[in-house]
Image (cartoon, coloured by chain):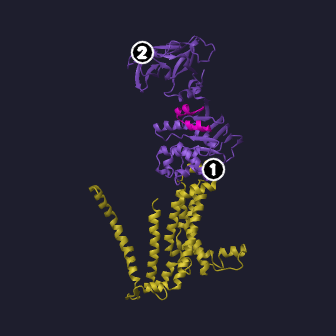
Chain colours: A purple, B yellow
Amino acid sequence: MAAITLKNIVKSYDKTQVVKGIDLAIEDGEFVVLVGPSGCGKSTTLRMIAGLEQPTSGDIIIGDRVVNDIEPQDRNIAMVFQNYALYPHKSVKENIVFALRRLKVDNEEIERRLSEISEMLQLEELLERKPADLSGGQRQRVAMGRAIIREADVFLFDEPLSNLDSKLRSHMRTEIGKIHNKFGRTSVYVTHDQVEAMTLADKVVVLHDGYIAQSGTPMEIYLNPTNIFVAQFIGSPSMNIIEGTLFNDYLDIDGYHLPRNQLSNVAYQAPITDSGLKVKVGIRPDFFNDKAFFSETEITFNFTGLTIDLIEPMGFDKEVLFNLAGSSVKARLDLRSDITLGAKIDLLVDLSRVLIFDHKTEQRL
Amino acid sequence: MTPLERAEAKFGWKLVTPTILILGLLILYPLMYNVYLSFFDVQLNGYKTFVGFENYIKLLTNTDYYSAIGTTSLYLLGTVVGTTLLGLAMALLLKDPFKGRGLVNAAIMLPYVAPVISVVFGWQFLFDPISGVVNYLFVDALGIWSERTNLIGNPDSALWVVVLFDIWKHAPIAYLLILSKLVSVSRDQYEAAAIDGYGPIGRFFHVTLPELYFVLATVVLLRLIWNLNRFEDVYLLAPNVQTLPIFTYYQAFTGVIDQGLAAATSVIQLAVLSVFIWFYIKKIMKW
């Protein structure tokens, strides 16, 4: 068991800086998910923790030792690779126990752990097979088994589910969650899938272009993103960003006046000139709904007379598109909402969830 | 077979027929004729008398034949082990890209592509007892040997010169075969083994070697097959080293010419070779 600290980590290849100064403290037993689009530096950061890449500058501390100059084999970490990286010449069993053989664990103990792990991951029938004879999902489980059996200080996951189909992916996601709850090891998990980030993490770290855009609990990131990048990256469908103008008394969106004193999640208090302040308004599709589905006590604003351009029934709910201030805006409505294409309807929005961002810097106001 | 498959099979046979005819004429016919000859006492005027297994009996009671088998075994052992190890070592060293690798590669391949006859003269010059650099180095410069020796002149030491020559000339092909496999081993496997706690030596034995199994077996068997028949390198560099092909040549074309006996020698050699080739096709070519 160990905490991990990254101190001002920079990684460059030739002249390209991939990781541009990351500070991160991961507590003992915490499940941290690094999430971001391709090329944001998340995998590189993970590989530096593993020791497969050397940071150009900065310190990596695992437990109480700086591990910059320590080889991966001496860091006591376990890792699940994106394409599993199983040893093709070894049986499933030998793949799983390979690390234990190196540690000279006695055979009885190896067998005990193997049977525990293979039962947990339903690998009992597969132990004598070679990786080539396994399906993608089975290989993934073997890779998991190989990591878990170590009882290492730190678990690293490099997009472990990205090669699985969606059904298997959500199943394995649940399994990883269960395994973490059972063993409680410090885990760092890299993904570009925000659902995995939201569901698994104790702490989500959103990376953008080599920097940390925001880190916090999944709900913090979801409800209180600090900038438009994070706001749009986390949550599906992604947050609507609409042009608006902030005045002393109200927020103007396309002629609708949202009372400023009821925007309880807007911290910006400074007085504003009469011409108003151009801002970008962020509203998640989830926070729109029909009047019928809000309770009396909720503070809402009614966007009246919206024309619906498109309806996408999703099963449990339906997503509708309409136009507001020149942007196509999406709302996720209750299944029971009675709407028809082209009709004019009223939609309410929860005012406590309306966010505003600086027009230029795109930072939260 | 569907009609389409039958038509394709027919077309396939048409394509390979010329090759089969040429191979039959140039290889199969002489081969069979050689087996036939081995049962005759052959005169130079072409007159033949059937002698049954007499040639084989004569051969198997000849001590020179056993000494040729011994020489061939040492030659095969030295060259196969030497080229494989040297090829492997070079491939491991030169696996990762570095500046000037193309040049180094070209230099390594040179001995393999150079014509035998020219490099043989070069080597004879190197080992010359009076003006050769080898004697100069070991006697005059380093003082390891007390007197100049004619390494090629003495059949015992000449064998090792021939072995060395073969390693030098043929290690490049082993290097090339091994390298082509080595660069295709995925980096993930090495990384996974490092994470699993294995250092460079452990990674070599658990990742590199299993991946190289088939290519190493190919190198070993191909070298066995080629070198069992190797004539020109040995004969040109040191004609006093009597490996089986040289022994056969002396029987067939020099001194008391006995082509029937030479034919019998080749037949036995062919049988051994066939075993190697069968093994290669059955066990190794599967990859």
Percent of width and height locating residue A140? 51, 44
Q: Residue furthest left?
A: B3
Q: Is residue A128 above or below residue A260?
A: below
Q: Nearer the viewer, residue B55 or A1?
A: A1
**Image: magenta residue range:** A177-205
Kindly identify which residue carries mark 2: A345
Tell me the SS state at disc 2: strand
Q: Position of residue A105 (x, y in %)?
A: 63, 51
Residue A275 visible to the viewer: no
Which residue corresponds to the image point at 57% horizontal and 10% vertical from the top-left?
A: A249
Q: Position of residue B83 (x, y in %)?
A: 57, 67
Residue A324: tell me if it is visible: yes
Q: Establish if B248 lies above or below A330.
A: below
Report the label total.
2
Q: Quadrant of the C terminus of chain A?
A: top right
Q: Chain of mark 2?
A: A
Give the residue type that dot 2 points to: Ile
- How packed mark 1 is, by other alpha carbons closer than 10 Å (few <14, some 14-19, many 20 or more), is many
The image quadrant that residue B203 belongs to is: bottom right
Mark 2: few, some, or many residues within 10 Å (few <14, many ≥20)?
Answer: some
Q: Are marks 2 and 1 in contact (CB under 8 Å)?
A: no
Determine the chain carrying the residue at label 1.
B
Instruction: Say the numbered circle drawn on residue B197.
Output: 1
- Mark 2 to mark 1 CA distance (whole Å): 63 Å
Camera-nearest residue between B126 and A257? A257
User: Seen in the image, is B118 located left or right of residue B281?
Assistant: right
Residue A128: percent from left, percent from top: 50, 52
Residue A195 covered by magenta stretch: yes
Q: Left or right: B193 with respect to B24? A: right
Q: Tell me if residue B93 is in the magenta stretch.
A: no
